[in-house]
Image (spheres, rainbow, N blue to C red):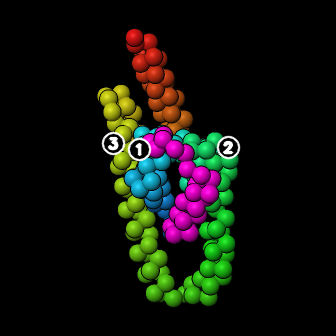
Amino acid sequence: MASTAAPSLRSIFGAFAKIGLTSFGGGLSGWLLREFVQRRAWLTEQEFLSGLALAQAFPGVNVVNLAIWIGFRLRAGPGAVVAALGMVVPAMAVAMPLVALFSQAADSQRVHIALAGVAAAAVGLSLQTGLRAARNAARGLARSLILVATFAAIFVWRLPLLWVVGTMAPLSIALAWSRVRTEAAKP
């Protein structure tokens, strides 16, 4: 963990509630990176990116998985519960009335233009996080080859995602396992 003192459960809830209430659409992982790594220094960038990779490997909503992981990393089980509640409950309380209002304005061209602008910002945040993760993952020839092969399989050759992940994930895990064993064997 980047910071020596673990934040309180109240601080964790407040941080996630702030993010849940002020974020729109995709790009949330970029916001989480900024909040917990750059601004609060509760995690290192390496810890965050490891958690992001783990969160994406589990079923469910990635950012909620990531919130659970960050909360667990900061304050174990209670931190995970508080982080998930902070991420979901306040945002849900605001979103439900907004959805009712949006249904009234769904045909407005201005609303669609505003949402397109929000979507562009969200894509920018996602791209920033993806580039950081790629830079971190591309350390060493074997890891770089896995990264390039995965990207090419999905975006160039348009192979089914499940087959690509089912093939590349075990390779990547075996590589990481081998690296950890090699480093542990060093005196």
Magenta stretch, main secondary structure, is helix
Question: The residue tagged with tag 3: helix, strand or loop?
Answer: helix
The reply to whether the C-beta atoms of the residues labelled 3 and 1 are less than 8 Å apart is: no
Mark 2 burial class by Cα count in 10 Å: few <14, some 14-19, many 20+: some
Q: CA distance from mark 2 to mark 3?
A: 31 Å
Q: Which mark is residue 45?
A: 1
- Say whether residue 158 is visible: no
Q: Nearer the viewer, residue 15 or 129?
A: 15
> How far across and down, in percent of the image, does residue 125 sit?
40, 60
> How far across and down, in percent of the image, does residue 179 sit?
42, 22
Q: CA distance from mark 3 to mark 1?
A: 12 Å
In which quadrant of the rendered image does the C terminus lie? top left
- Residue highlighted by disc 3: 135
> How far across and down, in percent of the image, does residue 157 sit?
40, 44
- Residue highlighted by disc 2: 77
Q: Which mark is residue 164?
A: none
Q: Nearer the viewer, residue 108 or 129?
A: 129
Tell me the magenta residue range: 1-23
Question: The residue tagged with tag 1: helix, strand or loop?
Answer: helix
Q: Tell me the kind of residue under disc 2.
A: Gly
